[in-house]
Image (cartoon, grey):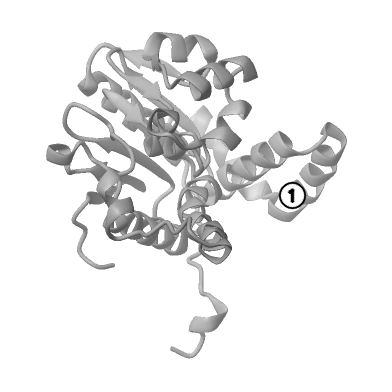
Amino acid sequence: MNPLTCFSLSTSDHIAHLVLNRPEAMNTMHPTFWRELDEVLSHLNKAGEARVLVISSTGKHFSAGMALETFGGAISMDDQSPEGRAAMFDLLAGMQATFTKLETLRIPVIAAIQGGCIGGAVDMVTACCIRYATADAFFCIQEINIGMVADVGTLQRLPKLVPLAVVKELAYTGRRLPAQKALGYGLVNEVFESEEAMLAAALQCAKEIASKPPVAIWGTKQAIHYTRDHSVDDALKQMGWLQGAIWSNQHVRESVTAMKEKRAGDFPGLSPLKYFNEIGL
């Protein structure tokens, strides 16, 4: 990968840790942010080394969302012609695709959120599997406060996570949702008094996930997301095909033996991906 400027990335014991590292800019999202995040997620998905991804941040706020100056400079939103307005579709599709990579990543993603999680940051964390927060954290659908509709995933994913009336209230008013209320609604899994305690818990959860058979974790994530978007009957059928595709007697025996012997299991990682257009390179 190219050197990162908006993030730092480390991998240890099969746990990848991606840190937003521009606290002086409140970790806002500009084109370089999107480009680097997309590259990191593609790399992790392809390599197969990491078995779980933790995303955390630095400074007072997790992220203040989209850098507003982006729309006046690097990205031009032309509303003066039907052709220009039509081009917004493809622009947004590219941005949406980056956050969708969090959802479709072959491994679980844990977000550790401190301070403000605002605008585009809500789009980002709702695409993650697990969310931990500090007591001072809050969530804000900021887009309505600047005269636009949230358009990169919040309005599509948040209704799957919290009651619809709550989504409407937040989306219509731009109010802040404090961490404790977010916990009550089920948006976050747990709230911690300090950032250190939150990150420790996130890494501990990641350690537990990384100790399981990676292909079983992959299958579990596939099944949960399919179930979310389909009927019970369809999801049960999909589960049969999925289980038949990845079942391993060896993994089950090793898991049971490891539990009895009170040790970590020994499992193969996910296979590295080789894309068709790379064959022969």
Q: Is residue 58 left or right of residue 113?
A: left
**Residue 13, how many percent across, how many down?**
32, 46
Examine the rendered structure and indicate whether residue 263 appears above or below residue 9.
above
Residue sitting at the far front: 80
Q: Which residue is mark 1?
A: 242
The single residue placed furthest to the left in the displayed view is 24
Q: Can residue 75 be seen at all in this image of the molecule?
A: yes
In the depicted view, which residue is nearer to us: 229 or 281? 229
Q: Position of residue 168 (x, y in %)?
A: 58, 20
| Residue 125 image-quadrant placement | top left
Q: Residue at x 29, y 22 (%)?
A: 198
The residue type indicated by label 1 comes to Leu
Q: In the shown orientation, is residue 253 left or right of residue 49?
A: right
Query: Which corner quadrant holds the N terminus?
Result: bottom left
Helix, strand or loop at disc 1?
helix
Residue at the image position 51 percent from the left and 74 percent from the top: 274
- The quadrant the C terminus occupies is bottom left
Q: Residues within 10 Å of mark 1 (few under 14, many from 20)?
A: some
Q: Quadrant of residue 17?
A: top left
- Residue 20 x, y percent position in the rendering: 24, 42
Give whichever of 177, 198 is nearer the camera: 177
Tell me which residue sits at (27%, 27%) in the image: 199
Q: Position of residue 52 (x, y in %)?
A: 42, 43
Instruction: Report the number of discs.
Output: 1
Q: Is residue 18 left or right of residue 257?
A: left
- Furthest toward the bottom, the residue is 280
Q: Is residue 256 visible to us here? A: no
